[in-house]
Image (cartoon, grey):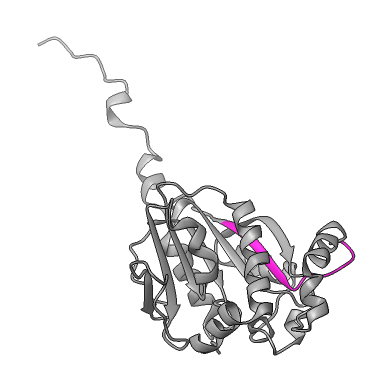
Amino acid sequence: MHLDVQVLREFYYRSTLGRAAQSAVRGELERLWPDARGQTVAGFGFPAPLLRPYLGQARRVLALMPAPQGVMAWPAGLPNVSVLCEETLWPLDTGTVDKLVLMHGLETSEQPSALLEEAWRVLEPEGRVLFIVPSRGGLWARSDATPFGYGRPYTLRQLETQLVRHAFVPGRTVTTLYQPPSQRRFWRRTAPVWEALGARFSVVVSGGVLMVEASKRVQAPRGPGLREAVRKPLGVLRPRPEAKPV
């Protein structure tokens, strides 16, 4: 079940914990995708906190927000790029998105398979998609004080298995949000330290969020049509009998 857009906006834009989470996740996104010049960048779920760096360089930026969640105008002070849409029916042509981000979309969806099929459809053959989901082993999935405490948390293996099943090829993986999901002043002041330590000892410590980049697997056409047509040699290549004199 999707959270209400007002709850998400209050967390990310009006709480110190939400702003810290926004900074950590967006920082990893920018390291993965530093350049989007001339590209179409889209996000689904509640991607607004992550897409701002691309507003000035991408050819087109779209923030798709599902109807059960609701939509908010974004970005503030600039022409609106937010769109309210059906969860599994996006107002985008097939194969038109270069970079796609899903945050608070997959884990709260009641139709995850159909959602992944729609993400696959809109992505161009050489495009990239980034799935951002709560980590099953992290503290953030165990706390309902943050949006990552709702929906289905994933392990890395569970998420990659689901992606492969829906014709995605998993690539780079990042874990972030090692800071405790607490509003207390001590944890807010020391958040950068925890993020640095977590990144260094990520094999031992579980972060609160998994970020998995994937590409679109495009298979060769199947079916008997072409193979059956060329199974027999072409007639023009067959030797012709010599003509008999009249």
* Residue at 74% across, 72% down: 155
User: In the image, residue 157 lies at what x, y percent?
Assistant: 74, 67
Q: Which image quarter holds the N terminus?
A: bottom right
Specify start and end residues of the magenta stretch as a single range: 203-214
Between 215 and 196, the one lying in front of the other is: 196
- Residue 202 is covered by the magenta coloring: no
The relative height of residue 28 versus residue 237 in the rendered view (above or below) is: below
* Residue at 31% across, 20% down: 239
Q: Is residue 138 left or right of residue 166?
A: right
The relative height of residue 238 versus residue 203 in the rendered view (above or below) is: above
Asked whether residue 99 is in view, the answer is yes
User: In the image, residue 40 lies at what x, y percent?
Assistant: 41, 55
* Residue at 66% across, 81% down: 148
* Residue at 42% across, 52% down: 58
- Residue 204 is covered by the magenta coloring: yes
Q: Is residue 56 left or right of residue 246?
A: right
- Report the number of discs: 0
Q: Which image quarter holds the C terminus?
A: top left
